[in-house]
Amino acid sequence: MESFFAIRAIMAIVLIIFFAALFDSYPYLKAFFIALFFLVVIYYRRSQLANISAFTKKANGFDDRKILIPFYTIFLVFCAYDFLSQPMNLPITIFGGIVFTIGIYIYSNSVKKLGKFFSTAVEIKEKHRLIQNGPYKHVRHPAYFGSLLFLGGLAIAANSLIAGIIYLILLLPWFAWRISSEEKMLEKEFGKTFLEYKKKTKILIPKLL
């Protein structure tokens, strides 16, 4: 699985480098950033594929991913188009790239800590435990925080206004709904234990939010 994913990533890099060379500004520098982007994405995917998920015990009954995947796709298409077709603002691209990389790192560490209890859906696994250490010691949803960072960083790095608007009016509300839905499910499953954990932690950012 990983080797197949790596081959597809390499093919995508070669294709995008070719198209990048056809546009006007910084073609080779853009190609370098795109290659870095794919290397980071491979690291991100490995953190997901490394987990053997436990069986699902209960889910919220609504797979929101089917609705959000088209919006993710549109978001990524605008990021790619704006990055390739517009003159690059190097300081903004570097700043966005740093935010993106930090987000991927936080997300991947959070997924690794969840282990077999990780899921891309809102659900409770068999013999589910409430993880309260590592990145979950101070915040309840570090993986979502990492996701918000790497998506926001991607829009910034691409200098894409439209991707930024999609992020603000579609993706942020979706993450808010997700967090609310997950908190309700965790409270129902773990009761007093979760309420005590909730008192000691923030939602996304230690000591702030």
Image (cartoon, grey):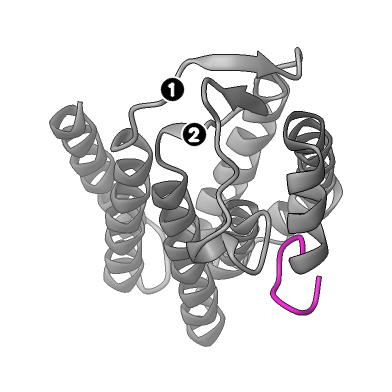
Number of numbered discs overlaid on the protein picture: 2
The image quadrant that residue 82 belongs to is bottom right
Label 1 crowding class (10 Å Cα cut-off): few <14, some 14-19, many 20+?
some
Please tell me whether mark 1 sits on a helix, a strand or a loop: loop
Q: Nearer the viewer, residue 57 or 38?
A: 57
Disc 2 residue type (three-letter): Phe
Q: Is residue 183 above or below residue 17?
A: above
Where's residue 23, x and y in %?
40, 59
Label 2 crowding class (10 Å Cα cut-off): few <14, some 14-19, many 20+?
many
Q: Are marks 1 and 2 in contact (CB under 8 Å)?
A: yes
Lower sequence index among marks 1 and 2: 1
Distance between the alpha carbons at the discs numbered 1 and 2 = 6 Å
Quarter of the image containing the N terminus? Answer: top left
Disc 1 residue type (three-letter): Ala
According to the picture, the residue beneath numbered tag 2 turns out to be 117
Please tell me whether mark 2 sits on a helix, a strand or a loop: helix
Where's residue 20, x and y in %?
35, 56
| The magenta stretch spans residue 207 | yes
> Image point 60% across, 64% down: which residue?
149
> Image point 42% across, 54% down: which residue?
108
Q: Is residue 93 above or below residue 58?
A: below
According to the picture, the residue beneath numbered tag 1 turns out to be 54
Query: What segment carries the magenta color?
Result: 201-209
User: Is residue 101 shown left or right of residue 208?
Assistant: left
Where's residue 145, x and y in %?
64, 60
Q: Is residue 203 above or below residue 41?
A: below
